[in-house]
Image (cartoon, rainbow, N blue to C red):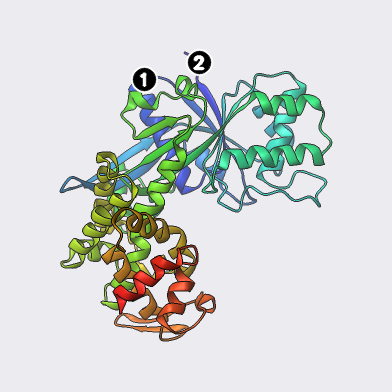
Amino acid sequence: MKPVNILQFGGGNFLRCFFDWMLQKVSDATGIQYSVTLAQLIPGEPVDGIAAAGSYHVLLRGYEGQEYVETLDSVGVIKNAVSPITDVDEYLRIGCGDMSLIVSNSTEAGIFFDPDTTEPHNYPSRLALLLNERAKRHLPPLMVMAMELNDRSGDLLKHTLLQYGKLFGYGREYFDYLSACDFYNTLVDRIVPGYPMDAAERAASKIGHEDKWLTSGERFHLFVIEGNKRILNEIPFDRAGLNVIVTTDKLAFYHDRKVRVLNGAHTASVPVALLSGIENVDAFASTEPYASWLSGMIHDEICLAMDGSAETHAYANDVTARFRNGALGHRFRSIALNSVSKADARMSPTISDYFRKTGEVPPKMTEAAGRLAELYGSGPVARLPGGFLELGDYSWIKGCSLREMLESFFPSLDSNIKEAMLRALS
C-alpha cells in the first residue's frame, strides 16, 4: 500500500497536536501510511528540525467523565520539509509529485490578498504558484483543507487563489484546475497550550530522552469538515474512533454551537469570576456556587436557546469538563481581552433566542451582562481582588450609564430585549 502524501503548510503546535496526531491514530487503526511534508510558512520556522527528528510526542490531559486522564502519544507521520520561501524549485518538485492533500493553519491573518505584489509572498500566493504548475503539467486535482479560524476558511482560500491567479496572469488551465480541486471549510476545536513546561521532565522520563518537539493539548477534540466526502477515502477518521464529522451542509450549526456554548460561556464568566477574585477557569468551574451557576447558564440558557437537543447538551457537558482542566492554564485575564467586541457575537444570539422562546431574558447571562458593566464601569483600569486589570477596549464604551453599557456590549440586540435586561438588572 503506497503512502498518502500530504503537503502541510506550517509545523506549529496546533497542527502537530491536532491534525498530525489524528493522522497517526488513523494509521495505527488502519495500516494506511501517511507521509507529511512540512512547508515553511514564515522565515525561521523550524520545519527541517521537526522533520529530521523522525517523530515527536503529544501529551494530552483532561477529564473523561469524572476521571482525570493523561496520555503520551508518539507521532511519526512527518517525513520531510521544504521551504517555498528559499527553495522554490524543490517546493515545486515535491508539490508536483504524487500528492493527495494540502492542509494549512496559517492563523486568521494568513489568508489575504495583496494587489500590490508581483511575486508570491504569502501562503495563498505560494500555493497559487504550485497549483498553477500542477495545472500546466495536467496533474490530478487535489483536496485542499484550510484549518484557519476564518469563517468558511476553504471558501476564503479559494477566492484568494482566484484573485492571485488573475493578478499573476495565469492561464485558463489554472482556473479550471481550481474548479476541479475540492476545497474544504473546517471547524477545529482543541485547546493546545504547546510545550508543557510543567510536565516536560516527567514526559522525558517516560520517553527515555528529551523531546524538543513535545507538545500538549486537552484530550477533547472536535473536527468538522464541510465538503466532498471523498476525503474519507484518503483519511478514514471514522475507523479510528475520532471525533470527526464530515458534512455537506451543517458546518454553520457546529460553528454557532461552539461560539455560543464554549466561547459564550467563557465571555459571560469573565466578569463574574474576576470580580469575585477567581483568576483561573478551572477554579471557577470547580468551586461552588460558581460551578452550578456556570452549568445552569450553559444547559438552562444557552442549550435551551439553541435547540435543546441531546447532542447539544452532550457537547455542553464536554465544555464544562474542559473548563475544569487545570492543565490548560486558562486565565480569565487572557479571556477578558476585547470583551466588549466579543460579548455581542458570543452572547447576543443566546439572549435573543431565549427571549423569543420564553418571553424573558436569560437570568444568568443577564447577570453576567450586569457584572460586565460593573467591570467596565470604573474606567479603563479595573481594580480587582486579584490586582489591577487594564481594559484595552474601554474606548468602545459609549457611556457610563447601565443603558449605555448594554448598548456598547450588545449593539445587535433588539431594543425591547435590552429594555427587558435593564428592568431585570434594576
Left or right, 18 with reference to 7:
left
Q: Quick one: 301 or 287, which is closer to the camera?
A: 301
Figure check: 153 above or below 272: above
Q: Identity of the amino acid at label 1?
A: Thr
Element carrying mark 2 = loop
Residue at 38% in and 53% down: 260
Q: Residue at x 46, y 13 (%)?
A: 1
Counting from the top left corner in percent of width and height, residue 364 is at 27, 65
Q: Which residue is mark 1?
A: 30
Vertical placement of 348 versus 37: above or below?
Answer: below
Reply above or below: 38 against 424. above
Horizontally, is 417 left or right of 50 in the view?
Answer: left
Q: Residues within 10 Å of mark 1 (few under 14, many from 20)?
A: some
- Residue depicted at 80% across the width and 49% down the height: 117
Between 240 and 351, the residue placed more toward the observer is 351
Q: Quadrant of the C terminus?
A: bottom left
Please state the horizontal and vertical placement of residue 276, each as a whole percent of the image.
26, 77
* Res. 274 visible in picture: no
> 424 or 330, which is in the foreground?
424
Location of residue 181 by image quarter: top right
Judge the density around disc 2: few (<14), some (14-19), many (≥20) Cα neighbours within 10 Å.
few
Camera-nearest label, 1 or 2: 1
Q: Give the amino acid at mark 2.
A: Lys
Question: Mark 1 or mark 2, which has the lower sequence index?
Answer: 2
| Residue at 24% from the left image edge and 51% from the top image edge | 321
Q: Secondary structure at mark 1?
A: helix
Residue under circle 2? 2
